[in-house]
Image (tube, coloured by chain):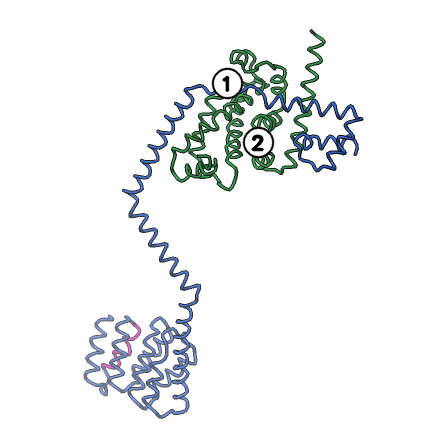
């Protein structure tokens, strides 16, 4: 079983053997769920988005290119789904300004923050593109090569952007830490 | 290296992506630059924190729902492929046939097969035509060659004034009946040409050979040439006209009027 790469599995799905999608679901659904959770801050919505994503994988299976990495393909689609989602959210409730901010109550209920709520707060304050890059690169561990494929750019451009994202996060994180320290 | 150079290399340094020399240089800088070493430790901390962020576990029903969706999708796929087999088979076969025909034509055109055969045929025709013309030019008294030459005038040829003049000469003045007849036959091809029709009508009254007269009458009547009526009446009235020709002219007159 170990010899079957994700690309081979997806290629079989593409050729009409839809059952192999179940393997890919078992392997990736958790990654995808977490990606959506960190991007939207809504756990219930993220479950729906995850289902939606795997349906899209089946629907658009013909467009999969086995020469390219499956990981960057699946996150590419996840990215598109997130964009659609945030558009619809903006449309549905005008004034919902900070879409990415993680809903505090919901997060606490689900033990989303764990023991480092400062980090989650800081991440939720980041612009979407920085948050996305950090989540994909540092949390899901995508390689620069995959990220470059995913964002249609070069590895060096991704590296530069990653550094900017980290610096932005650093700024928010340590500023907040100092402030809250003073307040306490 | 200044601080800015170091900062741009920090990520690669953390990922251990640098060669030994650059790595040493950075470490040397970090030893005495507090700002940079502070930045590095902060980034390192955040990197670690992010990679250790809580993972949300999949709820159990997520997979069940997915499997249901997958079954639905599979059924849809089955239905779809069945639809192709029963109803569109004929259409698919037809399109394949058309495709193959197109391909074959394409291959023939590309290899120039059709062109080559056509050109060869045309070359043959031209050479025989030249031959015939040459014969009539050098051997004006040979009747059979004249006739042969006349039959070579291709239908595709346009009526050039030269051609018309030579046909007129043959029709009016040639000694041999058969040559005149052949010239008339050659002229019959240009049914749409006004000049030719006038020529034939004029010829009808001056012609004295019954065979040629009958051929022309038949042709003019067939093409419903009303202007021929006068010449036909002249033929009927003229005492010198052959009886059979008169009969033909009479019949033709009835048809025309």
Q: Is residue B67 magenta?
A: no
Measured as percent of width and height from the top left, residue B11 is found at 68, 30
- The chain in blue: B
Which circle's residue, 2 or 1, is located before the other in the chain? 1
Please report the residue visible at 73 percent of the width from the left and 34 percent of the height from the top: B23
Q: Chain of mark 2?
A: A
Q: Chain of mark 1?
A: A
Please report the residue visible at 55 percent of the width from the left and 23 percent of the height from the top: A39
Of residues B182 and B107, the one drawn nearer to the viewer in this rendering = B107
Please report the residue visible at 70 percent of the width from the left and 23 percent of the height from the top: B41
Q: Quadrant of the C terminus of chain A?
A: top right
The answer to whether dots 2 and 1 both sit on one chain is yes
Checking the image for residue A43, the label placed there is 1
Measured as percent of width and height from the top left, residue B247 is found at 19, 80
Give the main secondary structure of the magenta stretch: helix
Of residues A34 and B122, the one drawn nearer to the viewer in this rendering = A34
User: On the image, which quarter does residue A163 sit in?
Assistant: top right
């Amino acid at each position: 079983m170990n010899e079957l790469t994700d690309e081979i599995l997806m290629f079989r799905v593409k050729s009409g053997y839809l059952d192999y999608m179940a393997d890919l679901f078992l392997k990736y659904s958790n990654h995808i769920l977490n990606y959506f959770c960190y991007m939207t801050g809504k756990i219930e919505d993220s479950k729906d988005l995850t289902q939606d994503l795997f349906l899209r994988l089946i629907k658009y299976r013909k467009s999969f290119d086995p020469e390219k990495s499956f990981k960057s393909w699946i996150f590419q689609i996840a990215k598109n789904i997130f964009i659609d989602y945030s558009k619809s959210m903006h449309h549905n409730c005008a004034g919902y300004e900070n879409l990415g901010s993680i809903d505090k109550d919901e997060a606490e209920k689900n033990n989303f923050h764990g023991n480092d709520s400062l980090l989650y707060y800081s991440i939720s304050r980041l612009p979407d593109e920085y948050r996305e890059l950090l989540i994909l690169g540092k949390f899901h561990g995508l390689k620069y090569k995959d990220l470059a494929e995913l964002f249609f750019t070069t590895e060096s451009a991704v590296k530069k952007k990653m550094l900017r994202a980290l610096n932005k996060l650093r700024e928010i994180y340590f500023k907040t830490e100092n402030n809250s320290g003073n307040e306490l | 290296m200044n601080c800015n150079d170091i900062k741009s290399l920090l990520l690669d340094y953390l990922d251990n992506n640098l060669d030994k020399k650059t790595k040493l240089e950075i470490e040397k800088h970090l030893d005495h630059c507090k700002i940079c070493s502070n930045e590095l430790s902060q980034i390192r901390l955040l990197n670690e924190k992010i990679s250790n962020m809580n993972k949300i576990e999949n709820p159990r029903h997520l997979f069940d729902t997915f499997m249901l969706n997958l079954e639905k999708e599979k059924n849809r796929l089955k239905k779809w492929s069945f639809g192709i087999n029963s109803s569109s088979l004929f259409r698919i076969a037809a399109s394949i046939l058309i495709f193959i025909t197109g391909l074959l034509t394409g291959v023939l055109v590309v290899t120039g097969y059709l062109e080559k055969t056509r050109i060869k045929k045309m070359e043959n025709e031209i050479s025989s035509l030249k031959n015939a013309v040459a014969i009539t030019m050098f051997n004006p008294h040979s009747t059979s060659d004249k006739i042969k030459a006349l039959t070579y005038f291709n239908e595709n040829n346009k009526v050039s004034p030269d051609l018309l003049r030579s046909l007129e000469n043959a029709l009016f003045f040639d000694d041999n009946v058969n040559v005149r007849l052949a010239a008339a036959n050659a002229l019959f091809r240009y049914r749409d040409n006004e000049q030719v029709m006038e020529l034939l009508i004029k010829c009808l009254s001056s012609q004295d050979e019954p065979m040629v007269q009958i051929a022309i009458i038949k042709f003019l009547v067939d093409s419903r040439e009303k202007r021929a009526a006068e010449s036909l009446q002249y033929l009927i009235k003229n005492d010198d006209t052959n009886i059979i020709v008169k009969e033909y002219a009479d019949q033709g007159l009835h048809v025309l009027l």
